[in-house]
Amino acid sequence: MTWELPESVEVDGGAVRWAKLGNGERAIVLVHGTPYSSFLWREIAPALAERYTVYVFDQLGYGYSEQAEGQDLTLAAQARRFAGLLRYWELDTAESAPAVVANDIGGAVVLRALLLEGARFRDLTLFDCVSGGPWERGLFALMRTHHEVFEQLPGYAHEALVSAHLRNATHAGFRPGVLETFLQPWLGPSGQAAYYRQYRQLAQADTEPFEALLSGIDIPVQLLWGRQDKILPPEYGHWLHEHLPQAPLYWIEDAGHLLQEDAPARLLAHLLT
């Protein structure tokens, strides 16, 4: 499937690519995590566009958006940019506030935007996402702590590592051509540098400031979690549910970290309900 982001907007640090699909009365914004891109929404966005105006974008440093040395790719910076995008799209008033859907670090980005940056949402769906607590773990923690070592990996070793990390996020496995699409932005010397640049800047210090505010969210929220998630296992879904007791938590069986890949129809059903 061809996936294009024809629009571009300059933000601090470079250009962010984005697209708008559909012409519904209400808006919905889809937010990806790392090391992915808006390509994750290639099946979900067109289906939602039958009912909504759908906004998708690649966060700065990812996908089609600009990659450059010196970019601030912290969760705090991405949250400020997300709030700025909503203003740019004129989705920043009580009347125009969008539904927001986020996965992986996209969850932390939108929660910071909502709780600390003054962004307005009509409702919120979070699934298999970074939200708080001790989430620096596994390979991510190693890459963050020892990024200078990973940055020196031979190209073939870097490609193998990223490929394995991507595969670990799906329970069902990627369909033909999908893994290669996610892998492409991170290849070559500049792509390899960009890959570890963004990982070394992601930190729990950027989620801790809003943890105590989660229970005060006063918009409708729903939580979804893949039962077989290896990146953020079910205990992270339980943690978020404990801090958002007003939000129902739905378990998606036979699905991993990426519901967009493992259970797109079930994800879409929840978003349309």
Image: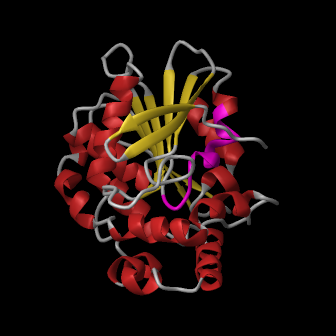
Can the viewer see residue 126? Answer: yes
Q: Position of residue 62 (x, y in %)?
A: 50, 53
The answer to whether residue 271 is left or right of residue 92 is right
Q: Position of residue 25 (x, y in %)?
A: 53, 12
Residue 104 vertical position relative to residue 48 in the rendered view, above or below? below
Reply yes or no: does residue 185 show up in magenta: no
User: Which residue is located at x 59 percent, y 59 percent?
Assistant: 185
Q: Which residues are magenta?
A: 34-45
Residue 57 vertical position relative to residue 144 in the rendered view, above or below? above
Residue situated in front as seen by the camera: 29 or 11:
11
Question: Where does the C terminus fall, quadrant-wise?
Answer: top right
Residue situated in front as seen by the camera: 209 or 32:
32
Q: Quadrant of residue 50?
A: top right
The answer to whether residue 56 is left or right of residue 179 is left
Residue 47 vertical position relative to residue 144 in the rendered view, above or below? above
Question: Where does the N terminus fall, quadrant-wise?
Answer: top right
Can the viewer see residue 244? Answer: no
User: Which residue is located at x 27 percent, y 46 percent?
Assistant: 112
Q: Position of residue 139 (x, y in %)?
A: 46, 80
Residue 70 vertical position relative to residue 6 in the rendered view, above or below? below
Q: Quadrant of residue 46?
A: top right
Label total for image? 0
The answer to whether residue 155 is left or right of residue 66 is right
Q: Position of residue 151 (x, y in %)?
A: 45, 80
The answer to whether residue 197 is left or right of residue 174 is left
Residue situated in front as seen by the camera: 26 or 220:
26
